[in-house]
Amino acid sequence: MKTKRYLCLIMCLLSLVSCHKGRTYWAHDIPAVSMEIERFDNAILNVHEATIAQDISVLYDEYPVFMPVWVEEILGIPSYDTACLIRQLPLFLNDTVYGFKQTNAREKELFENISDIQKSIDKAFSRIVWLYPELKDELPALYLFISGFNASVYFGDDLIGIGADMYLGSDYEYYNRVVYEYQKQTMRKECIPVDLVSAYLFHTIPFTSAKSRLLDQMIYRGKVMYLTAQLFDDLPGYEVMGWTKEQWKWCERYEKEIWHLVMDKRDLFKTESLVLTGYLNDAPFTSEVSQDAPGRLGIWLGWRIVESYMEHNPTVTLQELMAEGDAQKILGQSYYKP
């Protein structure tokens, strides 16, 4: 009898742990949402110099929304100035000094098949619409485009563009000319879904706190990262964060020391821009903590606090979490003690 009672107690404890630690938010029968990615990149790369005037006319006809945006935002040419576009577009496509021709060739090869990206994005947006049905009729059109190393994700009116040439692999040689070493980690094709969806969430879910302390920014961004991680629950945390595995492990190893340092410096309640950017902006390291700490460490800390909050409050839904604008409440009820 004692053995049975002990076994029952152990099973109950395990069930409580599983409810708190490994929460599952998704139903098995979520309606599928298709976010078709328009291949504007292919359309641009199929322009021929011999028929350029005709090809440009076709582009304006087939992409009446995105073509003017691309011409003005990427090429820096007024969309009505067709004569200038006829002169400049061949240079953009065939330049070898800045590596555009080589880059365009690599993009065309690497992105010949995007079914893996499409599947991941569809799954994430299906879950988003399941959480927020009101967004179903407001979903943006998606375009894959060539940015000339100008943009990874571009937001326009009712559209999002993905600069495919910014995702050609961390080892792509021409990136040495346009980005810093620490930025290359996320310049991989497989990073597109997380980059796109997290950018969409930041764009769609507003920062609602009346205060702008480091704590408020950390919790807001931590909430978005927590939701992103749930949408991509098949990915490890470091991929969602855009870090290496080693960077993630370093933060886990020194999490207690990091938190104590932040508390000792009383940085949580500071509002100075230098403090906020030091913890939250992309950088080779988080200067406020250590040169060994990866950039955006404040976002990771916010994510950890939110994670602890959700573990200690198992009845709180994702929608309720995202709507909660009281960062102090989330911190207090997280019982975060690394």
Image (cartoon, rainbow, N blue to C red):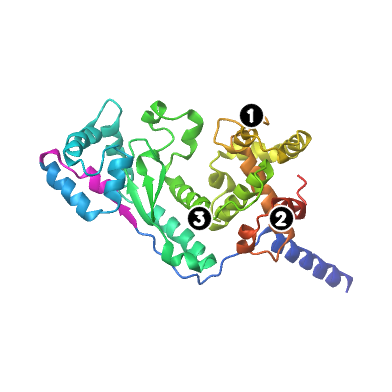
In the figure, 145 relative to 128: above or below?
A: above
Residue that extends furthest to the left in the rendered view of this protein: 50
The residue beneath circle 2 is 309
Q: Earlier in the sequence, mark 2 or mark 3?
A: 3
Residue 1 falls in image quadrant: bottom right
Q: Is residue 158 left or right of residue 338?
A: left
Q: Circle 1 — which element?
A: loop
Front-most of residues 317 and 271 = 271
* 66 in magenta: no
Contact, mark 1 vs mark 2 (Cβ under 8 Å): no
In the figure, 235 relative to 78: above or below?
A: below
In the figure, 165 relative to 22: above or below?
A: above
Q: Which of marks 1 and 2 is nearer the N terminus?
A: 1
Residue 165 falls in image quadrant: top left
Amino acid at circle 2: Tyr
Residue 54: x and y in percent read 12, 47
Q: Residues within 10 Å of mark 1 (few under 14, many from 20)?
A: some
Front-most of residues 187 and 330 = 330
**Quadrant location, the C terminus:** top right
Instruction: Name the mark on residue 204.
Output: 3
User: Given this view, does label 2 or label 3 mark the residue nearer the observer?
Assistant: 3
**In the image, what residue occupies the spot 22% across and 55% down?**
62
Amino acid at circle 3: Thr
The residue beneath circle 1 is 287
Residue 35 falls in image quadrant: bottom left
In the figure, 137 relative to 179: above or below?
A: below
Task: Please report the bounds of the magenta region as a residue range.
Answer: 37-50
Amino acid at circle 1: Ser
**In the image, what residue occupies the spot 65% across and 58% down?**
324
The answer, for residue 110, to whether it is visible in the render is yes
